[in-house]
Image: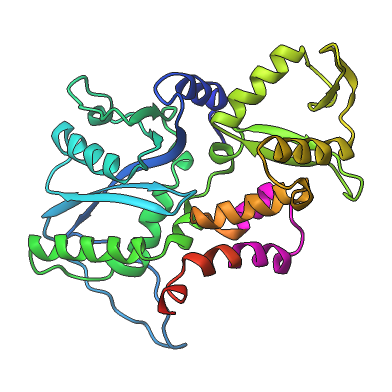
């Protein structure tokens, strides 16, 4: 499977420019033509039978302009009667509405003429990143079209153009109601993992080295620290002596606990109520408050026990959930 070799560098450039200070959402976009001369796909049938499927010879059609953000299971689509720059401009406006307020979207799509037109109006919270020529396998929306045709759009005769539009809208709404399927079909490892900054973690209880991915402001802060400390290899977090010199050895695990307690005391809090372990549990609680799925948060916190991690998330959801408001 091919991938964009310069994708990490391209995303880093966008993150430092148009998306500076914002989260980055990776979106994919494509169009599908759905018409009266429909496709015939495989169907289950009783053994020994030969089921028939209708096939229309008329040529009226419509286009689904679809975009997905696999990481968050988000979608944005329009059904249009034609495929040109005007229709693409309208679709970009629709995608822009679905991008989070604190985020900037990188929209990955092929190099069709209406995608690269100088007359295309691109919203300020979107940056277009074209795919290499002749590489449809890099666009997961192609797989979604296949799924939609096989399940909802093929083996049928449309009565009219309005019937085509209604079926397209109905099929997309069904897809929109299945975010987990969007995440599964649309996930592209090269797009969602390779561009993030990976931090290796070597723990005493780990069987092998682990990696935590950071994006956005944490990356800026970490890069600033690496530059100031002149660290190009070895441990990232190191001890600093009283004269401000950065040691070559790694920071002692106990020192992290001491730092947390010291900062709590400076803030006027009781240091006995705070510990380094609270950083991990607090991360899961805050992730639950922001609606981040538990498995995704556990990938970052590196919790092994789902039961233990669920306790932190459940305490957060119980405080803000509907059940709490009934009392």
- Residue at image point 39% right, 75% down: 43
In the picture shown, does residue 26 fall above or below 234?
A: below
Task: Check the picture and name the quadrant holding the N terminus.
Answer: top right
Residue 159, given in percent of the width and then of the height, sits at 9, 69
100 displayed left or right of 301: left
Q: Which residues are magenta?
A: 295-314
Numbered disc total: 0
The reply to whether the magenta stretch includes residue 232 is no
327 displayed left or right of 213: left
204 displayed left or right of 286: right
Residue 212, given in percent of the width and then of the height, sits at 70, 40
User: Main SS of the magenta segment?
Assistant: helix
- Residue at image point 74% right, 49% down: 274
In the picture shown, does residue 24 fall above or below 306?
A: above
In the depicted view, which residue is nearer to us: 12 or 307?
307
The reply to whether the magenta stretch includes residue 306 is yes
Colour scheme employed for the rendering of this structure: rainbow
Residue 294, given in percent of the width and then of the height, sits at 60, 59
- Residue at image point 17% right, 22% down: 119
In the picture shown, does residue 13 fall above or below 151?
A: above
Residue 80, given in percent of the width and then of the height, sits at 15, 48
Furthest-front residue in this view? 268
Task: Check the picture and name the quadrant holding the C terminus.
Answer: bottom left
Q: Which quadrant of the figure has residue 146?
A: bottom left
In the depicted view, which residue is nearer to us: 90 or 212?
212
- Residue at image point 79% right, 26% down: 236
Residue 262 in sight here: yes
Residue 154 in sight here: no
In the picture shown, does residue 268 fall above or below 284?
A: above
């Amino acid at each position: 499977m091919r991938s964009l070799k310069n994708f990490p560098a391209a995303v880093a450039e966008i993150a430092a420019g148009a998306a500076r200070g914002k989260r980055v959402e990776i979106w994919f976009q494509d169009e599908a033509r759905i018409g009266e001369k429909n496709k015939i796909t495989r169907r289950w049938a009783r053994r020994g039978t030969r089921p028939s499927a209708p096939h229309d010879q008329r040529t009226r059609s419509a286009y689904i302009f679809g975009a997905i953000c696999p990481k968050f299971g988000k979608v944005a689509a329009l059904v249009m009667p034609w495929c040109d720059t005007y229709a693409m401009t309208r679709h970009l406006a629709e995608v822009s509405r679905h991008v989070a307020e604190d985020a900037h979207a990188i929209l990955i799509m092929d190099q069709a003429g209406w995608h690269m037109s100088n007359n295309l109006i691109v919203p300020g919270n979107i940056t277009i990143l074209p795919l290499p020529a002749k590489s449809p396998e890099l666009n997961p929306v192609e797989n979604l079209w296949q799924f939609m045709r096989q399940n909802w759009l093929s083996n049928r005769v449309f009565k009219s153009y309005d019937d085509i539009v209604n079926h397209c809208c109905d099929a997309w709404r069904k897809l929109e109601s299945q975010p987990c399927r969007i995440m599964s079909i649309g996930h592209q490892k090269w797009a969602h993992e390779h561009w993030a900054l990976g931090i290796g973690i070597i723990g005493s209880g780990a069987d092998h080295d682990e990696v935590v991915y950071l994006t956005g402001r944490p990356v800026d802060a970490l890069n600033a620290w690496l530059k100031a400390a002149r660290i190009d290899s070895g441990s990232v977090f190191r001890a600093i002596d009283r004269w401000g010199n950065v040691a070559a050895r790694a920071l002692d695990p106990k020192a992290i606990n001491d730092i947390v307690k010291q900062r709590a005391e400076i803030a006027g809090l009781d240091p006995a109520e705070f510990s380094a372990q609270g950083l991990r549990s607090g991360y899961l609680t805050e992730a639950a408050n922001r609606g981040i799925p538990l498995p995704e948060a556990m990938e970052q916190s590196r919790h092994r026990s789902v039961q233990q991690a669920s306790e932190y998330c459940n305490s957060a959801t119980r405080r803000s959930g509907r059940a709490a408001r009934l009392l």
